[in-house]
Image (spheres, grey):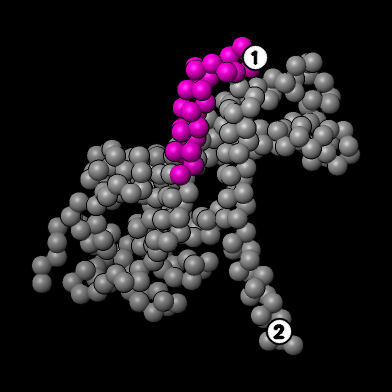
Amino acid sequence: MTSFAAKVFGRVERLCQHLPVALNTFLVFSITGEVSYLVLVEAPLEADQKKTVWSSWWKMVHLLAQYFMLGNICWNALLFLKTSPSIRGVFLGGDGLGQGWRYCYTCETHTPPRCSHCYDCKVCVLRRDHHCVFFGQCVGFRNYRYFLSCLLFMWSGLLYATLMNAEVFIVILKEGVTVHSVLLLLIPWIMLVSGQVSARAFAFAFIADTCVVGFLLVSAFFFFHLFLLFRGQTTREWYSSRRPYSLGLLGNLRHTLGIRWYLCWLSPLIPSPVPGDGIHFEVTGSLEPSRS
């Protein structure tokens, strides 16, 4: 009985770990589908413009822009999940052992400064920033570029979707700020269940609300991590006025995003290696190679 309960608990735990990723995927594709519908069907609003050459080009540009952002979100998220930020495969020893090193009794190994154990991932993470509950994985030295790029395209995509959904808010509020329109924007689920609105009106209101709320949340995360990137800090270090690992603005950009930091935002496929030995810097805190 105990073994059966443990198996059930293990399966439920694994399901819960993948639930945030599944939910995020559903919301991203739902928003993309709704915005595509707005572009292809609802816009332009004037009837005499719907079949013009300008309308066709306008739609094509919008579709290319939104699917470029969608592709970058998905590809960066996939690479983030596939890139392990742990210390597995990293040589931690020799002359590099020094001040700031600790011993992790769970992993049974010495760990360098800025490395800490994650009890969700069950491993020590090199330059651990935080455990991202939305992806179910830690953000560390190896996958920080993909995490930040994903945040960038999520921010730009949600900004674009919010602007495109402005017409939805205009339609809902066209008769003024009434109790019905306010409730539809604030609690669309209850309005749907109570039969006050159609499924189509609910879908538009729900996705429009999701775009606004998501944009505000992602904006906070994105600009906070940009602030940390410029300062050469992690989330665990941001409250401190000391910045012993800061290499200056350009140095922090090159060390985190690679030597092609100005291009790596465009696509995760663009190679952007870290100058010198980035792992060596994370382990020793020095850009100079160790001498035996």
Q: Where residue 31 appears, x then y in whole percent?
A: 60, 39
* Front position among marks 2 and 1: 1
Q: Main secondary structure of the magenta part?
A: helix
Task: Tell me the residue at 24%/39% (across/down).
Answer: 250
Q: Is residue 235 above or below residue 45?
A: below
Earlier along the polypeptide chain: callout 2 or callout 1?
Answer: 2
Disc 2 and disc 1: Cα gap in Å? 63 Å
- The kind of residue tagged 2 is Phe
- Toward the viewer: 155 or 52? 52
Give the farthest residue toward the left: 291
Task: Tell me the residue at 33%/49% (across/down).
Answer: 269
Determine crowd level at label 1: few under 14, some 14-19, many 20+ residues with C-alpha closer than 10 A: few
Rendering quarter of residue 107: bottom left
Q: Is residue 217 visible?
A: yes
| Residue under pointer 2 | 4
Q: Is residue 256 left or right of residue 132?
A: left
| Residue under pointer 1 | 47
Residue range (magenta): 45-71
Q: Where residue 141 appears, x then y in whole percent?
A: 35, 57
- The kind of residue tagged 1 is Ala
Q: Which type of secondary structure does the marked residue at label 2 adopt? A: helix
Q: Which type of secondary structure does the marked residue at label 1 adopt? A: helix
